[in-house]
Image (cartoon, grey):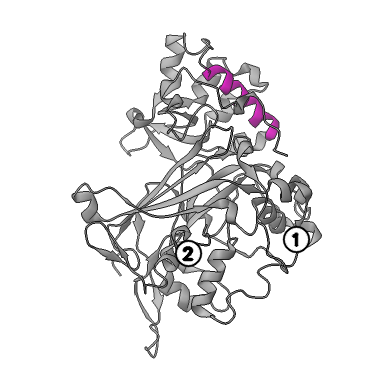
Amino acid sequence: MALPTDETHDPNLRSWIESANDPNTDFPIQNLPFGVFARAADRDEHGAGEPTVGVAIGDRVIDLAALAESGLLDDAGTELSEIFDWWSLNPLLWEGPSTWRAVRRRLSALLREDNGELRDDADVRSRVVVKMGDVEMLEPVEIGDYTDFYASIHHATNVGSMFRPDNPLLPNYKHIPIGYHGRASSVVVSGTPVTRPNGQTKADEAEGPTYGPCKLLDYEMEVGAVVGVANELGRPISINHAEDHLFGLLLCNDWSARDMQKWEYQPLGPFLAKSFITSVSPWIVTMEALKPFRVPSFERESGDPQPLPYLTSEQNSAHGGVTLTCEVYVSSETMRERNVAPLRLSSGSFADMYWTVSQMLTHHASNGCNMQPGDMFASGTVSGPEKSNRGCLLEYTWRGSEPVELPTGETRKFLQDGDEVIMKGFCTAPNARRIGFGECRGIVHPAASL
């Protein structure tokens, strides 16, 4: 049985914003993802514009602060102008699911093809509807804490087999969602330059370590989840109510310095190999918009242990997965100079994750950890059973032994300076309109001088 949907999910809905009706758009009226933007025309001498909350539809952005000031959001049932005239989505997150749903329903109504309230008011429309090309996207939320999980059994098995061929999975993997606390301050929005990190590494044949630029820079195609509702310190989150605490999902590139990681991860796990930068897409697709794309959780193999009761529910078993396709493209500097299109390396499915977002959040809070609105946790690399599903170069090139050949004749074992990584995500399902996540981009820049 599918999750209950409402009129906002109707695949036949059309918008008076014509670009939203393009079957290939990431942002049809059925999506309406939230983000934060600044108008390019408002940049000051420091290059910054005034941030405000917006929603994407087609090739336009709806300025929600201006829309609230016009009075057209009054039917959403709360005072919204101050909530949307802000530099992050955090004030909206604090309002909770009833407000999120009310805003979504009202926006859906205002943007429908047959509704003239906004469409026919030229003055208000000129202040509210902005071309996407005329805005600069900013970090969507003020992230208080960031945690990264390791939720793909395909990724964990592949990586484990490189280092432990006889025992790829550690004994705890099928019992517990594995994660580590990341660095919230270095989470950046798509398009932010990626400076190659300096760090300590040790070659296998060397007597001791050296310090310098990372040589084995990698990407990791991940999905991030944004917490919307807090839990009190000491109060766990039930698996039955986990998604009531989630606002939505976005794309996440957990850039990784593999040579630094290999040297430092024993015995406490990732540190400087991960904390130098994490890129996220600017638009958060709400859990409400994702309802038509929910599928059963990962089907465990016969003989696998069942999750402990606190990680088990009928709802999670029936609807814990998401049919989200995650694609990775790479473009070298030479490819861009020659106008060669980015090369798609992989396409994986978020439905292949061993642990669901509900299980990750429930486990995270199971010790009483207090999650806060704006906190983010990521899934770990999204990988599947085939090589074409592998969501990082460590897997895709099998630790560098199977280099990628680019259309220009260049080869890659790991990323070089000037390479751009482009991540895309979209959801499809029968009797549902395709929705997308936009892009998460980053170009690798040389390491800083020592």
Q: Position of residue 374 (x, y in %)?
A: 59, 45
Dominant secondary structure (helix, strand or loop) of the stretch shown in magenta:
helix
Instruction: Indicate yes or no whether the magenta region holds residue 99.
Output: yes
Amino acid under label 1? Asn
User: What residue is disc 1 on?
Assistant: 367
Residue 218's place in the image compared with 70, above or below, is below
Query: Would you say residue 87 is visible in this rendering?
Result: no
**Residue drawn where x is 43% and y is 73% of the image:** 260
Residue in the foreground of this view, choosing between 22 and 74: 22
User: What residue is disc 2 on?
Assistant: 274
**Residue drawn where x is 72% and y is 47% of the image:** 318
Residue in the foreground of this view, choosing between 88 and 223: 223
Q: What segment is highlighted magenta in the picture?
A: 97-112
Q: Position of residue 340 (x, y in %)?
A: 24, 49
Amino acid under label 2? Lys
User: Is 388 on the left-hand or right-hand side of 97?
Assistant: left
